[in-house]
């Protein structure tokens, strides 16, 4: 299931109807994102900010290099709301990208919570994204999911919102003992590549180590150190487009919780389970105990020329689940006023 890490599909759709002329941002609100200008990380962060429509060529922040590190969520500074982020990834490893903020550091965990939003008639969850980028490397997240009820979706993904490259671990409340792996290339919504794996117990009851090992040659998913799936780049060649359907672009690690049961899309509901049980005080929570990141070489891109003899179509059993057919409707941030200068930032 494709999750828009930084911007909700709804925001993008709304913004496209109010697209501004180029270079409308001024020097006090220099960063352009989805039809609006402002000066904070929500607008200026690499991957969110549109360098063409921003004030000038240096308005958008540069991508932060990958950092080999372990984040234990022992300090509140390990995950903060994106608007409070000053741009130093060494200080804040993760950023909560939605408002209101439903993510916090508590008891040595990153907690992503989802509560009911009566206005939208669905759960409002959280998305937390790394301040650093990653372009190949090994990431292990120790996670206790929120899979205790149908419709509740937990996710650990590596994604580039611009290119639509994405590598996933996802858990749906409908199948509490299962983790699903998937990957996307170039925004192609091909849900048939999802493969489920039975973890052997409710993923919301215990922590497990979920690893994405991403190299130029292969994508490997591991659970508790055991390889559960491997996709070789050479096997993703598509002769029709003469490309490898394989994620290669600079991305961000992210975690999210959202309400698939009230997504409004039938395919998504069937995939996640529904109805999502909501009571007056219901709160669903996904916990991340730690994230271990080991960077791969950013410079080790494989040659992009296809092989002279395309590989045969990979064989294998297609996953049995029902696939979602539409983007989840994640909760949008409230947009600031259109291109109003904000001198207070200077
Ligand atoms: C972009 O604008 C800022 C703020 O006015 C300025 O400091 C910077 O030098 C400009 N960069 C370019 C490439 O013009």
Image (tube, rainbow, N blue to C red):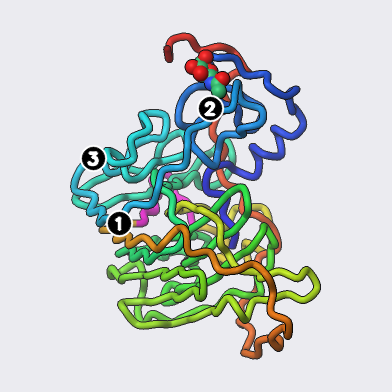
Q: Which mark is residue 68?
A: 1
Q: Secondary structure at mark 1?
A: loop
Work out whether 321 lies above or below 272.
Answer: below
Which residue is labeled 2 in the image?
A: 58
Q: Is residue 43 visible?
A: no
In the displayed structure image, the side of residue 40 where residue 211 appears, left or right:
left
Q: Secondary structure at mark 2?
A: loop
Sequence-wise first label, 3 or 1 = 1
Q: Residue at x 60, y 21 (%)?
A: 55
Sequence-wise first label, 2 or 1 = 2
Query: Residue 210 at what x, y percent from top left?
Result: 36, 70
Q: Which residue is nearer to you in this view: 172 or 32? A: 32
Q: Which mark is residue 76?
A: 3
What's the magenta region? 277-286
The answer to whether the residue bearing label 3 lies less than 8 angstroms from the nearest atom of ligand 1 is no
Sequence-wise first label, 2 or 3 = 2
Contact (CB < 8 A) between labels 2 and 3? no
The answer to whether the residue bearing label 2 lies less than 8 angstroms from the nearest atom of ligand 1 is yes
Mark 3: give few (<14), some (14-19) or many (20+) Cα within 10 Å: some
Work out whether 144 lies above or below 202.
Answer: above
In the displayed structure image, the side of residue 322 where residue 138 appears, left or right:
left
The answer to whether the residue bearing label 1 lies less than 8 angstroms from the nearest atom of ligand 1 is no
Front position among marks 3 and 1? 1
Residue 279 belongs to the span the image colors magenta: yes
Work out whether 262 lies above or below 346.
Answer: below
Q: Residue at x 61, y 79 (%)?
A: 234
Front position among marks 2 and 3? 2
Q: Which mark is residue 261?
A: none
Where's the C terminus, which quadrant? Answer: top left
Mark 2: give few (<14), some (14-19) or many (20+) Cα within 10 Å: few
């Amino acid at each position: 299931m494709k999750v828009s890490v930084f911007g909700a599909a709804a925001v993008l759709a709304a913004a496209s109807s109010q697209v501004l002329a180029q270079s409308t941002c001024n020097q006090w609100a220099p960063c352009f994102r989805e039809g609006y200008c402002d000066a904070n990380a929500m607008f200026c962060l690499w991957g969110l900010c549109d360098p063409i429509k921003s004030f000038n060529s240096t308005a958008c922040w540069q991508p932060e290099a990958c950092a080999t590190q372990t984040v234990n969520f022992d300090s509140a500074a390990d995950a903060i709301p994106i608007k409070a982020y000053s741009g130093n990834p060494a200080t804040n490893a993760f950023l909560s990208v939605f408002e209101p903020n439903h993510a916090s550091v508590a008891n040595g965990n990153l907690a992503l919570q989802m509560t009911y939003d009566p206005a939208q008639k669905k759960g409002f969850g959280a998305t937390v994204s790394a301040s650093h980028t990653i372009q190949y490397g090994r990431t292990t997240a120790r996670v206790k999911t929120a899979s205790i009820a149908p419709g509740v979706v937990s996710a650990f993904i590596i994604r580039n919102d611009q290119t639509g490259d994405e590598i996933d671990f996802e858990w749906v409340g409908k199948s509490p003992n299962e983790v699903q792996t998937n990957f996307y290339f170039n925004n192609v919504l091909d849900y048939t590549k999802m493969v489920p794996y039975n973890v052997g117990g409710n993923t919301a009851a215990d922590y497990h180590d979920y690893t994405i090992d991403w190299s130029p040659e292969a994508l490997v998913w591991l659970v508790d150190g055991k390889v559960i799936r491997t996709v070789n780049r050479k096997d993703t060649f598509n002769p029709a487009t003469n490309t490898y359907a394989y994620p290669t672009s600079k991305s961000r690690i992210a975690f999210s919780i959202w309400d698939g049961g009230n997504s409004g899309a039938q395919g998504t509901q069937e995939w996640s389970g529904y109805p999502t049980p909501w009571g007056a005080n219901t709160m669903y929570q996904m916990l991340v105990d730690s994230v271990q990141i080991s960077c791969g070489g950013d410079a080790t891109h494989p040659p992009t020329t296809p092989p002279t003899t395309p590989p045969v179509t990979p064989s294998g059993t297609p996953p049995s689940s029902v696939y979602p057919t539409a983007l989840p409707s994640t909760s949008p941030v409230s947009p600031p006023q259109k291109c109003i200068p904000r001198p207070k930032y200077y």
